[in-house]
Image (cartoon, coloured by chain):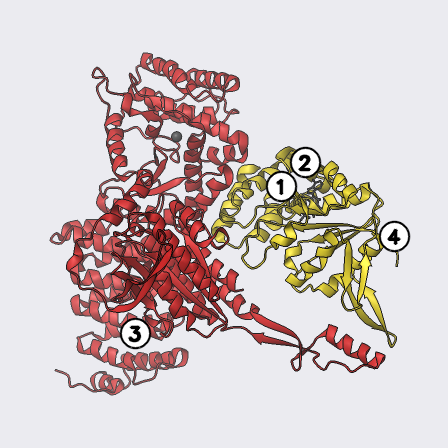
């Protein structure tokens, strides 16, 4: 099994907000695992892709979810043509062969899942395959990155203190309006004017986070709206489809957001 | 006199003959009602008709009523038919055949036009009231009713109607004028109910909108206009409060929302950009009006620089028709409205030199220093001089700001500096001064500032109702002594506070009707919780689903020749009833405060939110108990049981409605009581949620730290017993102490208290989901 498929050939466009590129690079050199904190759709995934490309390392990304167990990360025995074969999970593969492993929204996974990464994040740099009874020493190039959205205030789901403290963290926020406009122009292929309108709308919606909305509109939804607009859909309708309706079911908040869209364009 | 016979058909046949029209009508109606609504022959309907017949209703009334029944039954249900018959019966008892038939026909038109059945039923009830008190006005009211029901909510039509009856108990003539809408009072009342209904409908979204654009909250308050105010009023900005009179300019239903948006965003633009108040000294009324007109244009232009769409939105409200070249009439009204348009719409070309001058001065000033609000004063002085020379009179009494979404402008001026004796106070001045005084009394901002001080003051005062008998003792509880660093046993007496359930409808059921949306969302949460809460156990001996990992291991074990583990199933068990909630509501004196910008007291909000949560809990099938507490020293901690863990929820709303604020907050003891009761419950999870508005205090405690530490200890002990405790602090001052007592992660502060209804339920389903 080769990591070939996980290498990124073309440069993924990433517009840095500050020094995060240099800092990530430094952390990588020292193999200090990284925790990316920030709201959804603000460029965390894109950043990791960009860094992987920049450092010419293959990138294995895993989106974590409710039902994910340790076996989904680490691997399991499977039956193949009457024989049992061990199949490495994505994490194990990255550990053995020296890739960057990006665990997106790690809190979503079951608690036991986070524990398996602990030995990878300290001096041991090893992964224990319990079922196979094997201790995999990490490849020198292996690097672990996880992400976490602190906006979802939740009593039951939160990163354990013991997990958090094993990482160096980079804080992500929505890009400032000027930069975000550039991103939208570039990613959605709309004019700077339209992009500026969309960014205004997003900025306004973010004023409602934790106050009508759980989170405001993300850069991702703006790009979606932009793409619809470039297909000829009127701005207000595209915003309705791509931003407002997905964001909330509350009738009052929707009415307010629709009026805010009118005010922004 | 008629003998009471139960068979109506026989009765009618005896009287009118079996082939008569009326007997045929009766039979066909009976058949239709039976077919469509399953109304059998011997039911109330039949008896009601007999009563009506006995009340001397002639064949005309009966046949008209049956026609109404046949129309109505297509849009409504059995009970509606009964209600209709009952109303007509009462009308028939009070007035003659002619008016009764008018009423019946009116009802029929309502049902025919597919008007909501509630309107039709309300209309008939309204006519009953008229039949008793103002029979002469029935035709006049009926004639206007379609219009009335289009403009007002049915309840408000009834209120308007009762107002008319109460205003003129002894004068037929005046009542007739009222119900024909030719009395100004009748119109102003109508405007009042209309404006009121409509503003409440938009309030929530308007607040979101302002926050969305400018990240600030507007403090919107409804202002009850006087009954005589016949003309539309403007919004008023007073300090940081925006007053919305009940008589704001009216628009058609569909456009009223747009009107309120324009008005509130204009006020918000002032909030944001009018940084100072203009000193009033030496200003004549006309100058005041001009200054505020120019300042209006300035703040709108600044707002539109941030949000370009706003310019267009506001422009739509200008009513001036710009006919090129036509001269502008030399009246204040036409000059001012045209100037307002000219300053708002840079593309507006005007032949009038005064308007053009205004545009030029404003554009120049704005492009050089847009933030300089005193440009308004300077330009107003120049333009005002010109008007003086043109000898155009300004009458402050008849002046109204245009376009009509704009506030009255007086809030921009500083009247405190106006004690110049040479300056005769203008009409405007007087009005404004009156307003300012009122503001002093009502300003809720001040209340909030004082809250902390007052709260502790209050706690110290012994209540006057001391002679009230003490409640039944529920238990003696220890209390932590911070100085001695130990528990003092049996230190506190917790007593029962009895509640008298309020019959429905009461204030609570009324408030709840405005929360239908929240209730619906909570129901969805509850339903999801019901489905979502499974407990999954892998590697079980039996179950419906095979655990793939385990199955894999079996095959592998077989292949490797070892003995397989037979536990290959996943068991999913509904964990439905595996949680019990104990909700504890603080009902101390301070919860009687109305938070800034709110309409309900803190306790009322807590009660409304609880009632909504209770619906959700019942839908989810979770066990729960609800309690409220206050205290009057260590020997009288009062605990009201709204629903014990054993009772069903039947009395919850009635008892909740009976809670009243009073006394102090000995939280720890209340928690100990609840924790004890909750520990006896069988479920795996046991949760306590506390709603409180401040730190613990009591009349016999000088040092507030003591009760705080006691509460912390009560919580620590409960947690050690496996209970989960959370707190929603109500109000900003409660936040810090709640975080100290419950821990930051178990405290869920609200941005605004209005969020409580949805947040309380959301929190519950989140922590249990
Ligand atoms: N700084 C950025 N540079 C380039 N693209 C960005 C940036 N921030 C956001 N994006 C765009 O937003 C989209 C969503 O970002 P993503 O990285 O998937 O968000 P996250 O992982 O934080 O949820 C990306 O696909 C990209 O188009
Ligand atoms: Mg104004």
- Residue A69 at x, y percent in the picture: 70, 64
- Residue B30 spot, x, y in % from top left: 34, 81
CA gap, disc 1 and disc 2: 9 Å
What's the distance in space between the residues labelled 3 and 4, CA to CA? 79 Å
Callout 3 touching callout 4 (CB < 8 Å):
no
Badge 3 and badge 1 both on one subunit? no
Number of residues whose C-alpha sits closer than 10 Å to that of mark 2, classed few (under 14), some (14–19) or many (20 or more): some
C-alpha distance separating marks 2 and 4: 30 Å
Give the quadrant of the N terminus of chain B: bottom left
Q: Sequence-wise, which precedes: disc 4 or disc 1? A: 4
Sequence-first disc among 1 and 2: 2
Residue tagged 1: A173
Q: Horizontal and vertical percent for residue A56?
A: 84, 44
| Rendered image: mark on residue B184 | none
Q: Which residue is mark 3?
A: B82
**Labels 1 and 2 touching (C-beta < 8 A):** yes
Choose top left, top right, bottom left or bottom right for residue B36: bottom left
Q: Are marks 4 and 1 on the same chain?
A: yes
Disc assigned to residue A17? 2
């Amino acid at each position: 099994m080769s990591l070939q498929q996980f290498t990124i050939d073309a440069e993924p466009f990433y517009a840095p907000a500050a020094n995060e590129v240099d800092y990530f690079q430094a952390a990588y050199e020292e193999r200090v695992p990284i925790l990316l904190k920030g709201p959804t759709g603000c460029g965390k995934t894109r950043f990791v892709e960009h860094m992987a490309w920049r450092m010419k390392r293959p990138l294995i990304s895993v989106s974590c979810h409710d039902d994910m167990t340790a076996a989904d990360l680490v691997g399991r025995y499977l039956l193949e043509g009457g024989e049992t074969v061990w199949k490495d999970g994505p994490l194990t593969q990255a550990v053995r062969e020296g890739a960057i492993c990006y665990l997106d929204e790690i809190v979503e996974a079951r608690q036991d899942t986070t524990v398996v990464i602990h030995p990878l994040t300290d001096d041991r740099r090893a992964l224990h395959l319990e079922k196979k009874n094997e201790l995999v020493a990490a490849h020198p190039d292996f690097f672990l990155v996880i992400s976490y959205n602190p906006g979802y205030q939740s009593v039951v789901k939160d990163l354990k203190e013991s997990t958090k403290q094993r990482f160096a963290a980079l804080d992500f926020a929505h890009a400032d309006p000027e930069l975000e406009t550039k991103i939208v122009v570039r990613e959605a292929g709309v004019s700077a004017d339209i992009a500026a309108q969309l960014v205004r709308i997003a900025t306004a919606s973010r004023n409602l986070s934790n106050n009508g909305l759980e989170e405001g509109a993300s850069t991702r939804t703006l790009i979606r709206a932009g793409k619809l607009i470039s297909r000829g859909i009127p701005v207000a309708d595209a915003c309705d489809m791509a931003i407002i309706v997905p964001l909330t079911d509350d009738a009052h908040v929707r009415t307010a957001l629709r009026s805010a869209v009118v005010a922004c364009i | 006199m008629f003998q009471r016979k139960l068979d109506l058909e026989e009765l009618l046949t005896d009287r009118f003959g079996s082939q008569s029209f009326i007997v045929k009508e009766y039979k066909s109606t009976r058949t239709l009602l039976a077919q469509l609504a399953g109304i059998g022959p011997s039911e109330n309907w039949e008896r009601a008709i007999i009563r009506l017949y006995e009340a001397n209703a002639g064949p005309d009334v009966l046949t008209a009523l049956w026609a109404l029944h046949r129309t109505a039954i297509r849009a409504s249900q059995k009970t509606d038919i009964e209600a209709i018959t009952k109303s007509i019966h009462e009308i028939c008892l009070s007035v003659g055949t002619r008016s009764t038939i008018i009423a019946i026909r009116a009802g029929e038109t309502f049902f025919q036009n597919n008007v909501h059945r509630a309107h039709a039923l309300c209309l008939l009830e309204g006519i009953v009231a008229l039949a008793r008190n103002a029979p002469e006005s029935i035709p006049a009211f009926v004639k206007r009713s379609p219009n009335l029901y289009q403009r007002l909510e049915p309840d408000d039509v009834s209120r308007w109607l009762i107002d008319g009856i109460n205003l003129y108990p002894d004068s037929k003539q005046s009542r007739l004028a009222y119900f024909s809408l030719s009395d100004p009072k009748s119109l102003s009342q109508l405007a009042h109910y209309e404006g009121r209904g409509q503003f409440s409908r938009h309030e929530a979204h308007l607040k979101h909108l302002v926050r969305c654009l400018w990240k600030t909250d507007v403090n919107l308050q409804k202002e009850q206009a006087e009954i005589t105010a016949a003309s539309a009023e403007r919004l008023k900005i007073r300090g940081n409060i925006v007053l919305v009179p009940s008589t704001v300019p009216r628009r058609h239903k569909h456009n009223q929302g747009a009107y309120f948006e324009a008005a509130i965003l204009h006020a918000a633009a002032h909030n944001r950009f009018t940084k100072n108040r203009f000193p009033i000294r030496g200003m004549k009324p006309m100058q005041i009006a001009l200054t505020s007109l120019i300042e209006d244009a300035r703040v709108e232009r600044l707002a539109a620089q941030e949000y370009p769409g706003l310019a267009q939105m506001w422009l739509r409200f200008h009513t001036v028709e710009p006919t090129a070249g036509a001269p502008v009439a030399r009246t204040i009204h036409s000059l001012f409205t045209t100037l307002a348009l000219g300053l708002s719409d840079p593309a507006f070309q005007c032949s009038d030199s005064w308007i053009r001058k205004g545009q030029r001065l404003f554009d120049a000033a704005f492009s050089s220093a847009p933030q300089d609000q005193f440009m308004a004063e300077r330009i107003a002085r120049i333009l005002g001089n010109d008007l003086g020379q043109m000898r155009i009179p300004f009458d402050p009494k008849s002046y109204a700001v245009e376009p009509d979404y704009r506030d009255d402008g007086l809030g921009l001026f500083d009247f405190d500096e106006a004690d110049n004796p040479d300056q005769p106070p203008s009409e405007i001045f007087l009005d404004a001064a009156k307003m300012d005084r009122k503001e002093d009394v009502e300003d809720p901002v001040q209340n909030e500032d004082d809250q902390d001080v007052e709260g502790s003051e209050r706690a110290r005062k012994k209540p006057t109702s001391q002679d009230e008998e003490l409640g039944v003792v529920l238990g003696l509880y220890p209390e932590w002594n911070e100085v001695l660093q130990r528990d003092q046993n049996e230190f506190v007496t917790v007593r029962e506070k009895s509640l008298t359930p309020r019959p429905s409808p009461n204030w609570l059921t009324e408030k709840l009707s405005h929360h239908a949306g929240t209730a619906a969302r909570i129901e969805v949460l509850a339903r999801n919780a019901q489905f979502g809460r499974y407990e999954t156990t892998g590697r079980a001996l039996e179950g419906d689903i095979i655990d793939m990992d385990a199955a894999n291991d079996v095959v592998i074990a077989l292949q490797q020749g070892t003995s397989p583990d037979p536990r290959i199933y996943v068991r999913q068990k509904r964990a439905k009833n595996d949680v019990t909630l104990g909700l504890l509501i603080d009902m101390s004196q301070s919860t009687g405060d109305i938070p800034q910008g709110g309409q309900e007291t803190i306790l009322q909000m807590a009660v409304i939110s609880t009632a909504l949560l209770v619906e959700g809990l019942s839908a989810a099938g979770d066990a729960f108990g609800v309690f409220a507490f206050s205290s009057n020293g260590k020997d009288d901690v009062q605990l009201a049981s709204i629903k014990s863990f054993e009772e069903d929820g039947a009395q919850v709303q009635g008892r909740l409605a009976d809670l009243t604020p009073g006394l102090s907050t000995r939280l720890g003891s209340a928690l100990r009581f609840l924790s004890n009761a909750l520990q006896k419950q069988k479920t795996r999870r046991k949760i306590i949620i506390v709603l409180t508005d401040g730190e613990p205090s009591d009349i016999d405690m000088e040092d507030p730290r003591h009760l705080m530490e006691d509460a912390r200890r009560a919580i620590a002990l409960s947690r050690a017993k496996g209970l989960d405790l959370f707190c929603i602090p109500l109000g900003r001052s409660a936040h810090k102490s709640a975080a100290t007592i419950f821990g930051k992660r178990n405290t869920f502060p609200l941005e605004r208290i209005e969020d409580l209804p949805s947040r309380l339920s959301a929190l519950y389903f989140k922590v249990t989901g």
